Structure formats: C-alpha cells, structure tokens
Image (cartoon, rainbow, N blue to C red):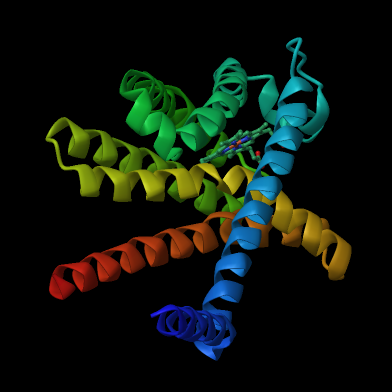
Amino acid sequence: MRTTLVNMMLSMEDKLISIKNSPNTKTFLSMHILKKVGAFSLIALFVYLSLLMLLITLQYIPLDLDAAFLATKQHVIKYQYYQIAFFAHVYSSIFILLLGSLQFIENIRNTYPLIHRSFGITYVFGIICISAPAGFVMGLHGNGGFIAQTSFCILSILWFYYTVRSFLAIKKGHITEHKNYMILSYALTLSALTLRLHKYILAHTVEMHRLDIYRLVSWSGWVINLGIAYAIIYRKKISKLNEHFMI
Ligand code: HEM
C-alpha cells in the first residue's frame, strides 16, 4: 500500500515536471510574462506622457496671451473667440485625459459605480460642450495650413461623435455599444499624447521641415490610435463569439 502511494506521488511529480517543461507551457508562460511587461510599459509611458501634458498645461496658468505655443498664434490670439476657445480647450482637456483613463479601471467600475457615473458624465460633457467645439475652432486656425487644419477639424468632429454615441448607448442600457464607443472616444483623447510623441520621435530621427513634421503628426497622432481601437473592438468581438460557441 505504502509503495503504491509513493509510486503514485512520484508519477504525479514526473507529470508535473513534464508539464512545466513542455514547450506549450513554456510558450504560454513566456507569452503571459511578455503581456504583463507590455501592459506595464504602456501604463508607465501613459503616466509619463500625461505628466508632460500636465506641465504643458501649467504653462498657461496664469492666463498669458504670449505663453509657450501661443507665440506661434499671435495672428489669431488677438481675437476674443480664439482666446475663449484656446483657454477653454487647454484647461478642460487635461481633466478629460485623467478622468477618461480612470473609467477603464475595472475595480473602480465595479466597486464604485457612482464614481464611474459622475466621472463619465464630466468626461462626456467636458468633451461635447467644451473641448471638442473649442478644438474645432482652434483647428480652423491650426499651424501647418490646410492639411493640418482638416485633420484637427475631422478629429474634433469624430471625438464629439464617438463620445455622444457612447453616452446615448448607455442611456439605452446598451453596455457593449457604450464600451466600444468609449474605446474609440478615448483613443482620440490619447491623440494629444501620441501627436506629441510622434513629433518628438520624427524631429529626432528624420530630416524634415518642422512644419511638414507637424502636418504628418496631425494625422498620424489620431489615425493610428483609431486603427488600434478598432482592432481591440474586433478582437473582443471574436473572443466573445468563440466563448459563445464553446459553451
Ligand atoms: C482629441 C481631440 C483634440 C483636438 C481636436 C484638439 C485640437 C487642438 C488644436 C487644433 C490645437 C491648436 C493646434 C494649432 O494651432 O496648431 C490644440 C492645442 C492644444 N491642445 Fe488639443 N486637441 C485635442 C485633445 C487634447 C487633449 C486631450 C489635451 C490635453 C490633455 C489637449 C491639450 C492641448 C494643449 C495644451 C494645446 C496647446 C498647444 C501646446 O501647448 O502644445 N488637447 N488642440
């Protein structure tokens, strides 16, 4: 009896060792670790770029018509409507960036639904009443001429559209639709970070005129994000379908 038990335990141990050493388990484990490292790096990059964005925003406090980037806008900053659009956009957008990021934390969503709801309402109304219309007005006067101006105006319209669709979806109780439109809306919110990241990378790697870089990143800054957002939504749909057929 004792020897059978010992033999059983030894064979189980052998099996465990062989599972641990099997190429499938090793690939699975390394994929898992790679995913964790990837997610951590992305979060660290997001935090770093958001802090830089906060520093950029702080340059405009106290209100000063010559501050930082406004040096390039002297031909329009004299108009009151541009001043209102500029400061409304800059002061509101930093909160939108922060609030939007918190909405994706599952723990907050499940444990504090009231916080999720009030942050969500502030995010939505911040975009549709202040930041997107202001971004559109600024887009009409964007640096980089027609190419960049068209990009900024389309970006503000899409930002407004996806955010409104997400809000209307949750009003009707359509959770998946709400989530998908929020992914699209926040992908565009992140364009504030990706545009500046692309600009920095290009300025330090390719020989291009400063304004040509600006024209290029005015598009790449949000089009790539939107592509990634659609890919995420598509993958979620496929894995839901797989789950459905496996049951
Ligand atoms: C996604 C929709 C957005 C649109 C359509 C948009 C549009 C614009 C436009 C057109 C300008 C002026 C560019 C120029 O004249 O060349 C601008 C500047 C600015 N935007 Fe946005 N923006 C968006 C998102 C954001 C977000 C999420 C933030 C903050 C986190 C932000 C912060 C700023 C700041 C600080 C400036 C002043 C320029 C600088 O100092 O770098 N924007 N935006």
Q: Quadrant of the N terminus?
A: bottom left
> Which quadrant of the render holds ligand 1?
top right
* Residue plotted at (77% across, 14% down): 64
Indicate the quadrant containing the C terminus: top left, top right, bottom left or bottom right: bottom left
Q: Residue at x 41, y 84 (%)?
A: 4
Q: Is residue 89 above or below residue 216?
A: above
Q: In the rendering, at what x and y percent does residue 6 appear?
A: 48, 80
* Residue that lies at the very extreme toward the top in this rendered image: 62
The residue shown at (55%, 24%) is 95
Image position of 201 (left or right of 230) = right
Q: Residue 133: x percent and y percent? A: 44, 30
| Res 37 → quadrant | bottom right
Viewer-side residue, 144 vs 228: 228
Q: Nearer the viewer, residue 18 or 182?
A: 18
**Residue at screen point 51% across, 37% down:** 101
Looking at the image, which residue sits at the far front? 1
